[in-house]
């Protein structure tokens, strides 16, 4: 998988899979810090356009030799539905970055795996059980600690990452319904294509010319990191099961707090740190319980 890259080519497929997942997880908050900078001066939907359109162009170039196969899907409605759900998650999360610290928004968003469990129970008839149920409740307690709904510092904007997490959980449930029947490249094509087409149709009505060269560079960079992150994810999942790499997703909170501190001088509050710790602990416990159940 890593030809001519020194020691990387000597790693086993499994090790490469884990490394690629770290790359994918790192790309996400890196993308977010660019979005946070841009949404302060540009319409959120315009930033979403930059994120999807550039990635879509990269995908078209990457898959050009076999594009006729990539665009074929057995489940067009399901592909559109899951793409719309991910689009909603992206929009609400970027909107939250206009008002919240990056680490705070990222920590609240991490209730998504817990929401996936709830939706799986409601729509896929999966049984939760007492222990998994407690972990879900614990995760929501962590989110409440961060949001602080009854305090003077509460802001309705704190609910935006929850909305994003809800859309992402819906996206994940819809993706499960695809199973392994669909080419992952087809799934990536529809995800990027849906966002690119929708935002391009809106663009003439919302466009605000970038005021600085920095803005243009960041918009182009979002395309690069978005494409790189998704492709690294696909390559990773070809070598390692998603259930094995799931704990690495929580590194996104660490990376988000790092970028928030380095770029915006954002220092996480004790409530954010404590709530994030509870959410991550709940998510990891839920992941472990699911692995035990699958082995049983």
Image: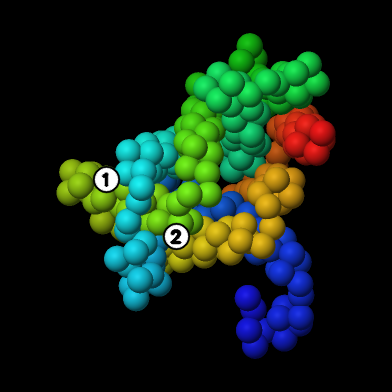
Asked if one can make out residue 55 in the rendered structure from this viewpoint, the answer is yes
Residue nearest the observer in this picture, 188 or 221 = 188
**From what the image shows, is residue 58 above or below residue 234?**
below
Label 2, label 1: how many angstroms apart (C-alpha)?
A: 20 Å
- Residue, x 70% and y 45% (percent of image)? 243
- Residue, x 82% and y 34% (percent of image)? 296
Residue 150 left/right relative to 138: left
**From what the image shows, is residue 134 above or below residue 235?**
above
Q: Which residue is mark 2?
A: 185
Residue nearest the observer in this picture, 255 or 232 = 232
Q: Which residue is mark 1?
A: 198
Dot 2 or dot 1, earlier in sequence: 2
Splitting the image into 4 quarters, where does residue 148 fall?
top right
Splitting the image into 4 quarters, where does residue 276 fall?
top right
Instruction: From the top left corner, tell me how far across and down residue 171 is, in percent.
Output: 48, 37
Could you say whether the residue bearing mark 1 is in a helix, strand or loop?
Answer: helix
Asked if one can make out residue 213 in the rendered structure from this viewpoint, the answer is no
């Amino acid at each position: 998988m890593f030809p001519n890259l020194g020691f990387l080519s000597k790693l086993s497929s499994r090790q490469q899979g884990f490394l690629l997942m770290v790359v994918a997880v790192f790309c996400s908050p890196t993308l977010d810090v660019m979005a946070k900078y841009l949404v302060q001066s540009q319409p959120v939907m315009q930033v979403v356009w930059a994120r999807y359109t550039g990635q879509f162009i990269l995908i078209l170039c990457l898959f050009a030799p076999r594009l006729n196969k990539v665009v074929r899907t057995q489940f067009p409605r399901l592909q559109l539905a899951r793409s719309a759900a991910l689009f909603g998650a992206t929009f609400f999360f970027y909107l939250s970055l206009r008002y919240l610290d990056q680490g705070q928004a990222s920590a609240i968003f991490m209730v998504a795996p817990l929401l996936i469990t709830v939706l799986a129970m409601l729509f896929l008839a999966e049984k939760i059980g007492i222990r998994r149920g407690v972990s879900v409740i614990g995760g929501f307690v962590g989110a409440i600690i961060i949001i602080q709904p009854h305090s003077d510092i509460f802001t309705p904007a704190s609910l935006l990452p929850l909305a994003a997490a809800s859309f992402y959980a819906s996206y994940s449930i819809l993706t499960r319904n695809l199973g392994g029947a669909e080419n992952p490249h087809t799934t990536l094509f529809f995800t990027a294509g849906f966002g690119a087409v929708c935002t391009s149709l809106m663009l003439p009505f919302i466009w605000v010319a970038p005021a600085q060269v920095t803005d243009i560079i960041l918009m182009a960079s979002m395309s690069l990191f978005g494409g790189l992150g998704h492709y690294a994810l696909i390559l990773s999942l070809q070598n390692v099961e998603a259930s094995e790499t799931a704990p690495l997703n929580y590194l996104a909170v660490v990376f988000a707090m790092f970028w928030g501190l380095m770029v915006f001088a954002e220092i996480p509050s004790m409530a954010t740190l404590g709530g994030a710790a509870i959410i991550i602990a709940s998510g990891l416990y839920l992941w472990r319980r699911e692995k035990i159940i699958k082995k049983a």
